[in-house]
Image: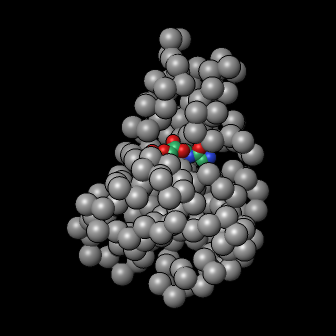
Amino acid sequence: MKRIAIFASGSGTNAEAIARHFADNDNIQVTCVLSNRANAGVHQRMQPFGIPTITLDKETWNTATPIVDMLQEQNIDLIVLAGFMRKIETPLTTAFARRIINIHPSLLPLHGGAGMYGHHVHEAVLAAGDTESGITIHYVDEMIDGGEIIFQARCEVLPDDTPDTLADRIHILEHRHFPQVIEQLLTD
Ligand code: GAR
C-alpha cells in the first residue's frame, strides 16, 4: 500500500478530487491531510472520505522536524501540496527529497515564486496579457516553485476573463490531471 499525505490551506477542491480518485483503490491511500488553517474548507471536504485532518501551528510548520517524524511513523510515500500556501522547510525537503510534489496554477516558470499563489497568479496572467495559461505539477525543493517539472497542461485565456473565470478553468484542469499524475508517480 502506498500512502499519501496532503498538505492544504484552502478550500480543498484538489484534495477532494484526489480523495475521490483513490477512495476505492487497494494500492494507494490518502492517509491524512495536514493544514496550517483550522478554518480551511479542506477539513469539511475530507469528512465524507473518513480522512483525518490536522491543523498544525506556525511554530510546528517552521520547525518541521515533528512533521517529518509524524509522516515517517505513518510510512508516508508521497507528500502532495494541494493549495498549500506556506514554504516547505528544509527538514521536510531533505527527508522527503523527490517525494513532495506541488500543483501551481500557471505554466511555470511563468508567474511563480514568493507571493504567487491562488488569485494573485491569475491576476498576473491577465495583467501580462497572456493568451494561454495552465497548470504545473512539479517536485518541491528549496526554491519556491523552482523544482523539476513533472507535468503541464494548457488552457486558453479569453479576452473577457476575470481572475475568477480563469481560476474556474484552471481548477477543471487540476482536478482532471492531478490525481492521475499522482497515481502514475506512485505506480512507476
Ligand atoms: C489551486 O488552484 C492551486 O493550484 C493553487 O491554489 C489553488 C487551491 O485550490 N496553488 C497555489 O497557488 C500554490 N502556489 P483548492 O484549495 O480548491 O485545491
Query: Residue placed farthest to the bottom in the image?
Result: 73
Above/below status of 27 relative to 39? below
Is residue 81 visible from the viewing direction of this image?
A: no
Residue farthest left in this picture: 24
Number of numbered discs visible in the structure rendering? 0
Q: Residue at x 49, y 26 (%)?
A: 164
Q: Residue at x 55, y 82 (%)?
A: 70
The answer to which of 31 and 102 lies nearer the viewer is 31
**Residue 81 location (% of width, % of height):** 54, 58
**Whether residue 46 is visible:** yes
| Picture quarter with the N terminus | bottom left
Residue at horizontal 57 percent and vertical 60 percent from the top: 36
Q: How is the image coloured?
A: one colour
Q: Quadrant of residue 50?
A: bottom left
Check the image and name the residue furthest to the top. 160
Q: Determine whether, in the image, residue 27 is placed left or right of residue 128.
A: left
- Residue 170 vs 152, above or below: the answer is above
Is 31 left, or right, of 102 in this rendering? left
Query: In the picture, which quadrant includes the C terminus?
Result: bottom left
Q: Position of residue 38 (x, y in %)?
A: 50, 58
Near-viewer residue (94 or 86): 86
- Percent position (x, y) of residue 31? 40, 74
Q: Position of residue 172 (x, y in %)?
A: 39, 37
The residue located at (43%, 67%) in the rendering is 53
